[in-house]
Image: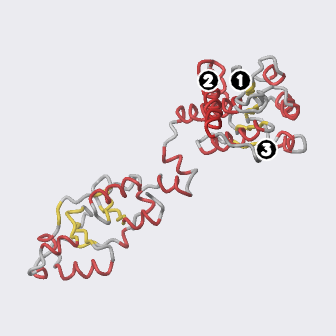
C-alpha cells in the first residue's frame, strides 16, 4: 500500500460489512443444508469408546485445534493431530476405538493422505468435512459432511474466510449437539475450567465456604457477653444461633447489636437475633451468593444443607478473592 494514499474510513467499513454479509450468507446455507450426515457424525462420536482425533492443514488446521479444545472442554475427549507430524510418527496417536474428524475445504489436501489411509487400514471411523462431494476425503470417509458452495469474502475469492467460518460453526454445532445429548451441565463444565474468570463464575458455594470448625455459632440461651466474644474471635461480624441438631434459629449481626445497645449484655442471643435470616445452599453457584449479598447489602451468608442444618459460611471477601463478579 502507498503510505501516502489517503485512508477512506467509509470504504474500510463497507469492506468489513461485505465480509460479514458474505460469511452470514454462508452460515445460512450451512444451516439450511444440515442433514442426516450431521446426525450420523454425532452418533459416530457418541458411540466411539475412544477420542475424537481432529486434524486439518493450514487454516483448517487452526480451526481443527479450536474444535478439539471445544470438544475436550465439553465432555467429548478429543485432541488435535497435525497431519504433517502424523506422517512422521504421530499416526500412533490414533488407535482403534477413536474416531477421526478431518477438515479440508477442497477435500484434496495432500498432507491428509496418510491419515486417511491409516483410518482405512485400522478401521478407524472417519468423518470428513469438505466442500467437494467428489473429493478424495469425502469419497473415502465413512461420514461425509459437505460444506455448501459459498463465496469467499475476499475480492479474489482465494483467502479462506467464508469456508473456515462455516467449518468452525459446523464443529461448534457438533460439540453443542453432543453436549445436549449428554446433558452436560454447568457443573461438569466447571470441572474442565477450574481456572480463570470462567471457573470462578461456575464455582459453587461449597468450594468457597468456611467449614464447621470456623463457624461463629452460639446455642439458644447463650448470654450476649459470650456471643460477642465468639463474634470477635471468628471475625465474620456475625453469630449464628443454632440448636444441638444443627438447625439455624437466627443470626446476630452488627445491626442487631446497635438496635439493642441499651442493656445489651443483659440479653441472650435469642432476644437479640434476627429470625429467618437469608441463607444459601452449598450447591448454589458462588455468583448467586455474591448477588444475594450485594442485593441485601450484607457481607456473609450461612450455608444450610437440605435439612436446614448449618454446613458453613461464605463471606463476600471469599467471592471477591476467587474472582467471582
The answer to the question of whether label 3 and label 2 lie on touching residues, with beta carbons closer than 8 A, is no
Give how far apart the Cα atoms at labels 3 and 1 are: 28 Å
Residue lying at 71% horizontally and 23% vertically, measured from the top left: 151
- Quadrant assignment for the C terminus: bottom left
Task: Indicate the quadrant where residue 225 lies.
Answer: bottom left
The residue wearing badge 1 is 151
Does the residue at mark 2 contact the one at mark 1 (Cβ under 8 Å)? yes
Which residue, given by chain and number where applicable, does mark 3 sit on? Answer: 2
What secondary structure is found at the residue carrying circle 3? loop
Mark number displayed over residue 25: 2
Q: Badge 2: few (under 14), some or many (20 or more) residues near its Cα, within 10 Å? A: some
Marks 3 and 2: which is nearer the front?
3
- Residue under the image location 52 percent in, 56 percent down: 197
Along the line of sight, the residue nearer the viewer: 70 or 220? 70
Left or right of 283 in this view: 53 = right
Q: Is residue 253 left or right of residue 33?
A: left
Residues 293 and 243: in front is 293
> What is the distance, in whole Å, between disc 2 and disc 1 at their CAs?
9 Å
Q: Quadrant of residue 22?
A: top right
Above-or-below relation of 98 to 228:
above
Extreme residue in the right direction: 88
- Residue 133, position in %: x, y? 77, 18
Amino acid at each position: 500500500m502507498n503510505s501516502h494514499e489517503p485512508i477512506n474510513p467509509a470504504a474500510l467499513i463497507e469492506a468489513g460489512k461485505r465480509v460479514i454479509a458474505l460469511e452470514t450468507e454462508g452460515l445460512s446455507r450451512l444451516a439450511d443444508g444440515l442433514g442426516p450426515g450431521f446426525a450420523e457424525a454425532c452418533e459416530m462420536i457418541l458411540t466411539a469408546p475412544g477420542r475424537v482425533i481432529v486434524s486439518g492443514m493450514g487454516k483448517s488446521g487452526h480451526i481443527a485445534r479450536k474444535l478439539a479444545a471445544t470438544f475436550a472442554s465439553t465432555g467429548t475427549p478429543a485432541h488435535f493431530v497435525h497431519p504433517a507430524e502424523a506422517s512422521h510418527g504421530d499416526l500412533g496417536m490414533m488407535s482403534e476405538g477413536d474416531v477421526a474428524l478431518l477438515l479440508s475445504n477442497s477435500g484434496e489436501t495432500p498432507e491428509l493422505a496418510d491419515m486417511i489411509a491409516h483410518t482405512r487400514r485400522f478401521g478407524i471411523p472417519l468423518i470428513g468435512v469438505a466442500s467437494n462431494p467428489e473429493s478424495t476425503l469425502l469419497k473415502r470417509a465413512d461420514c461425509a459432511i459437505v460444506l455448501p458452495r459459498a463465496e469467499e469474502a475476499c475480492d479474489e475469492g482465494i483467502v479462506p474466510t467464508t469456508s473456515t467460518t462455516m467449518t468452525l460453526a459446523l464443529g461448534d454445532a457438533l460439540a453443542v449437539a453432543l453436549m445436549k445429548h449428554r446433558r452436560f451441565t454447568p457443573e461438569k463444565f466447571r470441572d474442565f475450567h477450574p481456572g480463570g474468570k470462567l471457573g470462578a463464575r461456575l464455582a459453587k458455594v461449597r468450594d468457597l465456604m468456611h467449614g464447621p470448625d470456623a463457624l461463629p455459632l452460639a446455642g439458644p440461651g447463650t448470654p450476649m457477653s459470650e456471643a460477642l466474644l465468639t463474634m470477635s474471635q471468628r471475625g465474620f461480624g456475625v453469630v449464628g444461633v443454632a440448636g444441638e441438631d444443627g438447625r439455624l434459629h437466627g443470626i446476630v449481626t452488627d445491626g442487631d447489636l446497635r438496635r439493642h445497645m441499651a442493656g445489651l449484655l443483659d440479653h441472650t442471643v435469642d432476644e437479640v437475633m434476627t429470625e429467618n435470616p437469608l441463607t444459601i445452599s452449598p450447591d448454589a453457584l458462588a455468583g448467586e451468593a455474591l448477588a444475594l449479598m450485594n442485593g441485601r447489602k450484607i457481607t456473609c451468608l450461612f450455608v444450610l444443607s437440605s435439612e436446614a442444618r448449618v454446613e458453613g459460611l461464605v463471606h463476600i471477601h471469599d467471592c471477591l478473592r476467587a474472582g467471582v463478579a
